[in-house]
Every structure is written in C-alpha cells, then in structure tokens.
Image: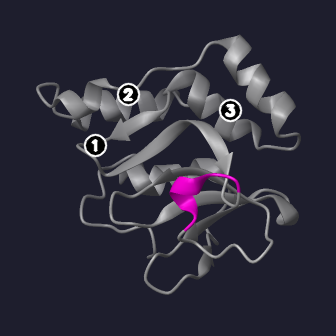
Amino acid sequence: MYEEEVAFLAAVENPEDQTNRQRQPLDADAVERIRQTFPGIPEDYLAYLREIGGGTVRQCQYVIYRTPEWCHEEPTFSWFEADGRKLLVIGDNFSGDLFAFDAEHNYRVVELLHETMEAWRFEGGGFKEFIRRGMLLGADGTDQKGYTLRR
C-alpha cells in the first residue's frame, strides 16, 4: 500500500541524519494487537505501521508513534481538553500539535492544536492522504517542500 511513499522517502531523506533511521516497521503480531485493541482503526494506518513504521520522517517533519494512546488516558496528552471525546493520538508535528483519530466519527483524522485547543478535522481524505501531506509528497509524486498540513 505504501510502496510509492517508501521510495519517496528513500529518495528525499538525508541518509546521514540519524532521525531518519529510527523508524521500525511493526510485525504482523504487533499490528494485530493494535487492531484488536482499537476495533475500527483504519487499515491504511495499520499498513503504514507495518510498511513504514513508527518514528520520525524527513528530518523531524512529523512523528507517528509506534502505538496509539487515548488522549484522555495518557498523562503526556493531558494538556489537551478532550471534553469526553474519544481521541486516539497517533503522532505529532514537533511543534506541539498532536495527530489523532476521532473514534466517534469513524476514526477520521484530526489535528489537536495546542494554541487554540481545537480539534482540526483533516478534509483531504483519510490517513494515507494526511500522511502524504505530512511527508510533503504531492499527488503527482513530487516533493512539495514548503507545503504545510493545513493547506
């Protein structure tokens, strides 16, 4: 599912930068544990963990965590006022904003903004489209360096 993205990262990431070598794809058992723990979690997210792996991308453009955590249960994310919403945190942008799935709305992708405490809904598709934007990978396969997730 992520062949193009893997090839893209191999072409654009600096192999000398240690942050680019910290991703570790999950094995089938680990992915299955996540699937069982969070029924309904998007398959394209699980494929990402299996094919690309949790960790940083493009010299810390973003990070996808090796395992998701409920926002309201993880003390690290306690700064975000979830107000009872079921938000499953999966990563961040190294600028204070979190990436999450809104489990009450078919696991749609949202960004939890640290400055305004808003949950910004990604309108450009599902997880795969969201993560391609984070990689700065255009629909035509070209590097979109300078593009931000909110555009």
User: Who comes first in sequence, dot 1 or dot 3?
Assistant: 3
Q: Amino acid at mark 3?
A: Leu
- In the rendered view, tell whether residue 66 sits above or below residue 101: above
Establish if 143 lies above or below 35: below
Q: Position of residue 103 (x, y in %)?
A: 81, 58
Q: Secondary structure at mark 1?
A: loop
Residue 19, image x and y in percent?
A: 24, 33
The amino acid on which the numbered mark 1 sits, given as a three-letter code, is Arg
Residue 137 visible to an observer of this rendering = no
Residue 30 is situated, as x and y percent measured from the top left of the image, at: 68, 18
Q: Give the percent coordinates (x, y) of residue 109.
A: 66, 61
Tell me the element at label 2. Answer: helix
Residue type, mark 2 in image: Ala
Q: Quadrant of residue 100?
A: bottom right
Determine which residue is flagged by label 2: 7
Q: Which residues are magenta?
A: 73-78
**Is 77 inside the magenta-drawn segment?**
yes
Quick check: 21 left or right of 116?
A: left
Local crowd size for mark 3, using a 10 Å CA cut-off: few (<14), some (14–19), many (≥20) = many
Would you say residue 107 sits in the magenta stretch? no
* Residue corresponding to mark 1: 58
Q: Is residue 57 left or right of residue 19?
A: right
Label 3 and label 2: CA atoms lie apart by 19 Å
User: Which residue appears at 82% of the width and 40% of the height?
Assistant: 38
Q: Which residue is mark 3?
A: 46
CA separation in Å, label 2 and label 1:
13 Å
